[in-house]
Image (tube, rainbow, N blue to C red):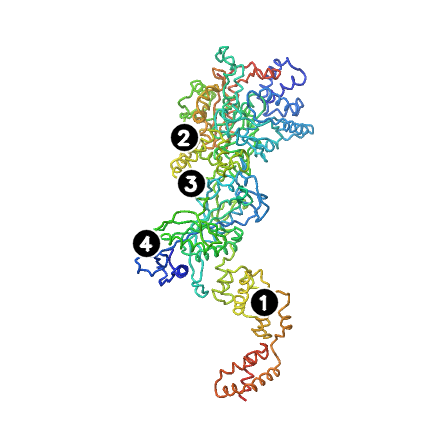
Amino acid sequence: MAARGCGGVWRRALQRGPGGSCSASRPRRAVACNARGGAVPVGQSGLAPWVPVVGLEIHAQITSNSKLFSGSQVQFAAPPNSLVSFFDASLPGTLPVLNRRCVEAAVMTGLALNCTINKKSLFDRKHYFYADLPAGYQITQQRVPIAVNGSLSYSLCIDNKMSQMVTKTVRIKQIQLEQDSGKSLHDDARSQTLVDLNRAGVGLMEVVMEPDMCCGEEAAAAVRELQLILQTLGSSQAIMAEGQLRVDANVSVHHPGEPYGVRTEVKNINSIRFLTKAVDYEIQRQIKELENGGTVVNETRAFDSKLGCTVPMRDKEGKQDYRFMPEPNLPPLILYDAKSLPANVNHQQVVNIDWIHERLPDLPSVKRAKLVELYGILPEHSFTLVNEDGLMEFFEDVVKRTQMKPKKVIGWILSDLLSHLKQHSLTANESPISSFLLADLLNLLENGDISSSAAKQVFEELWKGEGKTPLEIVKEKQLELIQDQEELEQICQAVIDEREKEVMAIKEGNKKVINKLIGLVRKATRGRANPLLVKQILEKKLSE
Amino acid sequence: MESLGVAAKWRRPGVRCGAGTGREDGRSGVRRRGVGRHAARFSAPAALKEGQITPTELCQRCLALVRSTQFLNAYITVAEETALKQAEESEKRYQRGQPLGELDGIPIAVKDNFNTAGIETTCASNMLKGYISPYNATVVQKLLDQGAVLLGKTNLDEFAMGSGSTDGVFGPVRNPWSYSRQYKEKSIPRSDSEPENSNWVIAGGSSGGSAAAVSAFTCFAALGSDTGGSTRNPAAHCGVVGLKPTYGLISRHGLIPLVNSMDVPGILTRCVDDAAVVLGSLAGHDPKDSTTVQDIFQPFALPTLTDVSKLSIGIPKEYHVPGLSSEILAVWSKAADLFKNAGAKVVEVSLPHTHYSIVCYHVLCTAEVASNMARFDGLEYGHRSDMSKSTESMYAATRREGFSDVVRGRILSGNYFLLKQNYEDYFVKAQKVRRLIANDFVKVFGSGIDILLTPITLSDAIPYVEFIKEDNRTRSTQDDILTQAANMAGLPAVNVPTALSERGLPIGLQFIGRSFQEKQLLTVAKWFEKQVQFPMIQLEEVKKHDDGVLQHQKSASFS
């Protein structure tokens, strides 16, 4: 099932390969590759096509004041080892105490991902020796996690065309609460390892996605949607660059009808863009390996973003037996709903699933639907608005402050503002043009004070961020439309007088030539003439 | 209570009488002690309040006894300076007439696997030699908050793994009874060629240091820990009361764990009343230990039972194990008769899964040990090897150097049981059997039995030279057999010193009660204690060093 519907995206990935003349047309079949790694049409070589399978394990750091099992603060980029409690450093005799906020964040996330919330979940110890794991084990939820059997719907566009969007669903196997590890810094020159335990014990939600995806772009779209959901819920800031969202991809390939191939796990992916690259690279690599008569080994590989490829991770060599064991210091985690909530209970002591459910904010999918309904914009536009950081809020602010219809505003937001932002790698919040200024500009346009080409000029000026208002720029550059009818008539007359040939043509019935005259008038006014008015004047004059 | 007797006794020779008058004072002390037993519990504070003795004097007396009994090796660390400072603080409170409670000014000792801020905590292991914890275990903090004076940290088997207090890096604990007149008189006379020292008997374990410290009068109460019998076993061998409370009643925060799911802080005192007082000061929910129960604990004073006819005492037949000495068996049945003759219902009951308990205990214990010991890697604290070839080689060398063979052996077997391929066959099965064992108790108590009466050790304490002929694992299996089931089921159990053996050594019996029914358990134990009139230790060695304040002419009244 994993291969279904992803052919379009996958095909392009393969075509980049050597001799990539791929003529596979039916998406489901994907492609078959010959021994040299070049793609050949299915059926001709007698080789079956490959079906890539991608599953994801995502670690999201929970946004909370304190850690999962201790009272130490959670803070990014604090001085090393400044946020370490006795428990975090695993001092003998210390015991874990579960942070209620982390439980609530996981319940919220589980509900948003359509999971069944387990009313009773358990904690386990997972053992391995590593310098940044002080206790020698991680407390996690291996046997009975807090949430299971959910799903996540995400959309992606086919062939990079916004107009061709498909919606897909990936099953969520489970969400488990667990501790983060510390950080090790290896100083090879002095052959020493430095350990920072600030992160040790921070609460994580591990979201396990079933292998329902089949290419890098699907994986990326799913992760982006998850990221938006987490940010909307506030359960995680989910900033990949800060390590708050970490994605490991399990990748394998097999022939249709055959069991899944041996999978590899790709780690060290720290942006969504790299996720696409890493997964696609790994699929390619496995296919090549198998086509060349090699085998894929079950291993952990790291994505090297500089080289754009995956490489085996040395320190994870050898099979680990984690010797799982129930965590004896934590009683089972019991959650309640309205029905099971015991009477006379202290509400600070319990987590009520129904209470959390009722207070869930609008999820991205709901936000998009509302945008379409409220502003009459296209679904794909709602997608961009929600997916781009802060863009939806920017758009709504502009709409509030302008008489221009939202349908027209969206054009300015997406084609002008967003393209400028992307060019400079900025988010909407960092835009040099505020929503106020853009609204002012659009109002000038909407009132007929300036032409749309003048508006573009003003936009460029505003982008420089020199602190001028649109009106000041219009005044300074004399971009106002000529409102004076007489002045316009004179200019039109001058054009008519100069262009006998064109006037003749129009009078002979070639009406289209009038556009040339309009263009000339606009040129003469440097864009300050209202084209509709100019057309009226010209038509009137020519029919005289 | 007893503490009054001792305190009063010390007062006189220490302050007025001087050396040489000890014997007579000792006698009067015994008489006073008899009175004390029937008086209100924990009357030492009364002596303190009445100014018969000051906390500082009491502390100095105890410190002197600690020094004079150093040969027992009961203490690993003596915190003389801080103890005197605490006593001074206590003294000020008494002067203001505002003592903190019944424990104010009372010298106590704590097993060296409880964290104590500023005082070394070693677990009798090279791994933690020199380790000074930055925090107090909750139980230690509670004792200090109530004004108790912490004399020091007591000896144990390394990481509490053992049943003799013979397997720690600071050497074995000697049972004070080895030096009692009772033992010396009854033991077979040795030839002159044999060194005088070779006859001493073990203290039991793993809380042997705490039991010996209480038994030798160096302190009034001590904390032990009890995972499979580690408080009750040495209590039995040293002739003191050893209480293992219900799992979840007392915080484990700060107790360096052996088996988290079975560990309970244990209480060692000279009489049942004292145990109830200490329990009252320690019990209750601790936000730092999620396994403590939320229910509010009401400290209680033990009533004096006069009528036991409504009691139903169960005698579990499975505790009649092979290897149980005829002497212990006789004491056990005498005790049963004692209840019967007093009108209690004494019923033979069956705990059919008891037989499987010790093997399951072994699997669960080693598995948790393997996990709990994983943190000792030399990085954050404790011993670190000089080996610096790689992080892994440093770990390996650190753990090889830091842990004894016993500890390493348990880690190895525990890891074996936890391997993916073995987990179902060992760990899961053991957990299931553990449930059956717990259910056995539930059924018996459900059938109307109030208290179970069982032996606690197979025999009286044996000489060290005999004990070490078997390895730690064999000894632990033998010695935990009658005690660990209570840990598997989480039930409260107490050792009550009952009689002296033919060799003049203590024999204790175990009472096991219902979950969280400590009051009922201790009430019955107190009644029993009064009936048996267990003799007081007559410490010849201590006499030499301490003005002869501790000898008594009473003989065993029960056997």
The first of marks 3 and 1 along the sequence is 3
The numbered disc on residue B359 is 2
Q: Secondary structure at mark 1?
A: helix
Q: Chain of mark 4?
A: A
Q: Are marks 2 and 1 on the same chain?
A: no
Crowding at dot 2, Cα within 10 Å, few <14 / some 14-19 / many 20+, comes out as some
Q: Is residue B119 left or right of residue B167?
A: right
User: Three-letter amino acid code at disc 3?
Assistant: Asp
Residue A21 point in image, percent of width and height? 37, 62
State the SS at label 3.
loop
Vertical comparison of A145 with B154: above or below:
below
Labels 2 and 4 share a subunit: no
Q: Residue furthest bottom?
A: A544
Q: Is residue B554 above or below residue A359?
A: above
Label 3 chain ID:
A
Q: Tell me whether the residue at label 2 lies in contact with that at label 3, contact meaning CB atoms closer than 8 angstroms.
A: no
Q: Which mark is residue A438?
A: 1
Q: Where is mark 4, residue-wise?
A: A257
Where residue A321 is drawn, which disc sits there? 3
Tell me the chain of label 1.
A
Q: Which is more N-terminal, label 1 or label 4?
A: 4
Q: As rendered, which of B536 and A274 lies closer to the eye?
A: A274
Residue B335 can be seen in this image: yes
Do the residues at discs 4 and 1 belong to one chain? yes
Q: Quadrant of residue B55?
A: top right
Three-letter amino acid code of the residue under disc 2: Val
Looking at the image, is A508 positioned above or below residue A169? below
